Image: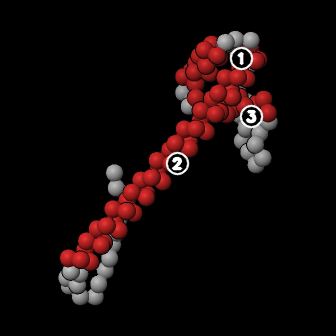
């Protein structure tokens, strides 16, 4: 996967000797590694946020309907599949329904009132 490019320009043809090209190659590989790490960090952060939201929603369903963890998760998964909506989105909507919208979130939608 290409994350970016390193472009170096000069006013004359073939101005860079082997040492300069090696330094540019090293810079390019380090920049690539840093960008790759940033993408990985962003992905892991999103996964942790999803897990937290889903776990919170499972707890809310458990408390609301007096069901075990597996049944609560199955309930959320069924809503997700039936509505063709990501599980994280279902979880966030349930949390919002329970606690109110986040400040600045004006397009809040509510979930169905069905039981697990």
Residue situated in front as seen by the camera: 78 or 26:
26
Identified at 67% across, 12% down, the residue is 68
Identified at 39% across, 63% down, the residue is 31
- Is 5 drawn above or below residue 41 in the view shown? below
Residue 42: % across, % down: 52, 48
- Is 44 drawn above or below residue 10 in the view shown? above
Viewed as shown, does residue 6 lie left or right of 60? left
| Dot 1: element | helix
Q: Is residue 106 visible?
A: no
Numbered disc in front, either 2 or 3: 2
Residue 102: % across, % down: 76, 43
- Is 21 drawn above or below residue 113 in the view shown? below
For residue 96, the mark is 3
- Per the image, the residue denoted by label 1 is 62
Residue situated in front as seen by the camera: 55 or 18:
18
Whether residues under marks 2 and 3 lie with C-beta atoms below 8 angstroms apart, the answer is no
Q: Earlier in the sequence, mark 2 or mark 1?
A: 2
- Per the image, the residue denoted by label 2 is 42
| Dot 3: element | helix
> What is the quadrant of the C terminus in the image?
top right
Residue situated in front as seen by the camera: 32 or 92:
32
Residue 83: % across, % down: 58, 25
Numbered disc in front, either 1 or 3: 1
């Amino acid at each position: 996967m290409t994350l970016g490019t390193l472009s170096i320009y000069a006013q004359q043809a073939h101005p860079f000797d082997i040492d300069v090209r090696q330094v540019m190659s090293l810079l390019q590989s380090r920049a690539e590694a840093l960008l790759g790490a940033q993408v990985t960090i962003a992905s892991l952060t999103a996964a942790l946020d999803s897990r937290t939201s889903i776990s919170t929603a499972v707890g809310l369903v458990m408390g609301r309907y007096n069901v075990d963890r597996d049944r609560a998760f199955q309930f959320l998964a069924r809503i997700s599949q039936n509505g063709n909506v990501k599980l994280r989105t279902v979880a966030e909507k349930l949390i919002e329904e329970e606690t109110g919208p986040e400040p600045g979130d004006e397009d809040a939608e509510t979930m169905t009132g069905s039981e697990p």
